[in-house]
Image (cartoon, grey):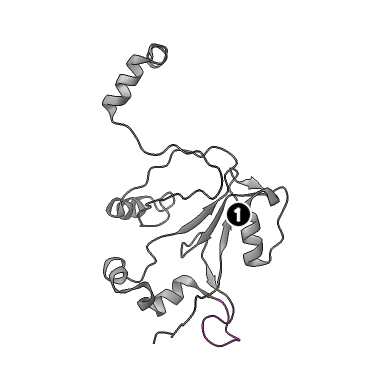
Amino acid sequence: MEMEVSRPLSLRCSVQKYDWGKLGKDSRVARLFSRNSDAEIEPDRPYAEFWMGTHESGPSFLVRGESGSPDSEPVSLRKWILDNPGFLGEKVVDRWGSELPFLFKVLSVAKALSIQAHPDKELAKVLHRMQPSIYKDPNQKPEMAIALTDFKALCGFVSIEIFESGITFFSTIALSIG
């Protein structure tokens, strides 16, 4: 039986402390996480990503009392959605089932990030089945970035023809890579 909700539900979210994150209070992620969880900010720890979603490596939970009675224990957002799939909307459930089809992240970047290539849904399922220790879940990873502060990023790839013409044009690069 689905719960009737007439207002947004409060979540306790997760934080990822990857080494490329900003340290302590310099990190907006740390400040956001501290406000969300009442946790103390560790001044020498990097805070890289604030996660809102159902990913098993950093799940969100409904705040105590949000899942029903005021005395209820926290329940994971994943379980709450499984019990209340209608809140995702008919089109989402038709396409994705009772799974939240995205992971919302806030990043606080201090160092350059590695190049990332994410598979589509079908390839993600295959890779997860073949190498679950590397591909942690069977979901696609479409990404969208919205900068809240100054941020520089390189996005996308060029065709091999454009790449080769650039290499040829810049002869010092061509000499160094052959």
Q: Nearer the viewer, residue 69 or 128?
A: 69
Residue 115 lies, with reference to residue 46, above or below; the image says above
Classify residue 32 as left or right of residue 156: right
Residue sitting at 43 percent across and 85 percent down?
4
Image quarter (top left, top right, bottom left or bottom right) of the N terminus: bottom left
Whole-percent x, y for residue 156 in the image: 36, 38
Residue sitting at 38 percent across and 50 percent down?
131
Q: For residue 24: magenta?
A: no
Q: Which residue is mark 1?
A: 29
Whole-percent x, y for residue 119 in the image: 33, 48
Classify residue 63 as left or right of residue 176: right
Magenta segment, which residues?
A: 64-74
Residue 99 lies, with reference to residue 18, above or below; the image says below
Amino acid type at image mark 1: Val
Residue sitting at 46 percent across and 82 percent down?
6
Residue 174 lies, with reference to residue 108, above or below; the image says above
